[in-house]
Amino acid sequence: MHLSFLTRGVNHEIELFKIFMQAQMFPWKRINLKTGKDEITAVQGSLRPIQLWEYIFPEECLGEVLAMLGLTNPKDYMTTPSLSKAKRWALMKMLQSKPLPAMPDQPITRFISRAGVAIYPIGIKKDPRKDYPNFGYNQEGL
């Protein structure tokens, strides 16, 4: 799963935000091709800078990621004057993303420092789930 977003804020707070984002580990479910059984391993969230950000994580953790970033309610972020609806849709099209879904409230289990950081979500994009014989698993192609 890929989450694209823009940030704006005090530089040292952005740097702290980046450190927190890069430090997150998520459970990653995949199927062992030899045994046919589900296995869960840890995978690090991957923050890829373009200064427009893309964050990579297992699809099953979408609710958790949106909660840690305060993005569970579209009413809270879809009306930001800094990113108009037209600009957001243009960026979504460019990034081949879909709108973020509204998520039910859930407890925040991961702390991400967001003081002095504004987050402007763009959209999400799913990864294919398929067999990777070279790794021996059927898994999401993070």
Image (tube, rainbow, N blue to C red):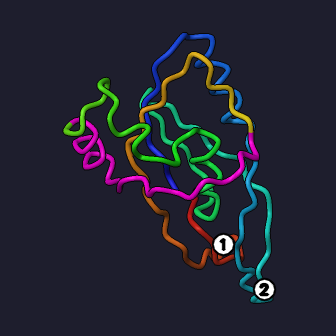
Say which amino acid is labelled 1. Asn
Image coordinates of residue 14 in percent, x first then y, are: 58, 19
Say which amino acid is labelled 2. Lys
Image coordinates of residue 104 in percent, x first then y, are: 56, 58
**Relative to residue 61, is residue 34 drawn left or right?**
right
**Residue holding disc 1:** 134
Quadrant of res 10: top right
Q: Secondary structure at mark 2?
A: loop
Depth order, front residue of 140/104: 104
Give the residues drawn in magenta, as a range.
87-110
Q: Residue at x 47, y 35 (%)?
A: 53
Quadrant of res 88: top left
Q: Secondary structure at mark 1?
A: loop
Distance from the alpha carbon under mark 1 to that under mark 2: 17 Å
* Circle 1 Cα neighbour tier, 10 Å, few/some/many (<14 / 14–19 / ≥20): few
The reply to whether discs 1 and 2 touch (Cβ–Cβ < 8 Å) is: no
* Residue 14 among those drawn in magenta: no
Q: Residue at x 41, y 37 (%)?
A: 77
Image coordinates of residue 38 in percent, x first then y, are: 76, 80
Q: Is residue 113 above or below residue 57?
A: above
Helix, strand or loop for the magenta stretch, by majority: loop
Quadrant of res 89: top left
The label on residue 37 is: 2
Image coordinates of residue 7 in percent, x first then y, are: 47, 26
Q: Is residue 76 above or below residue 92?
A: above
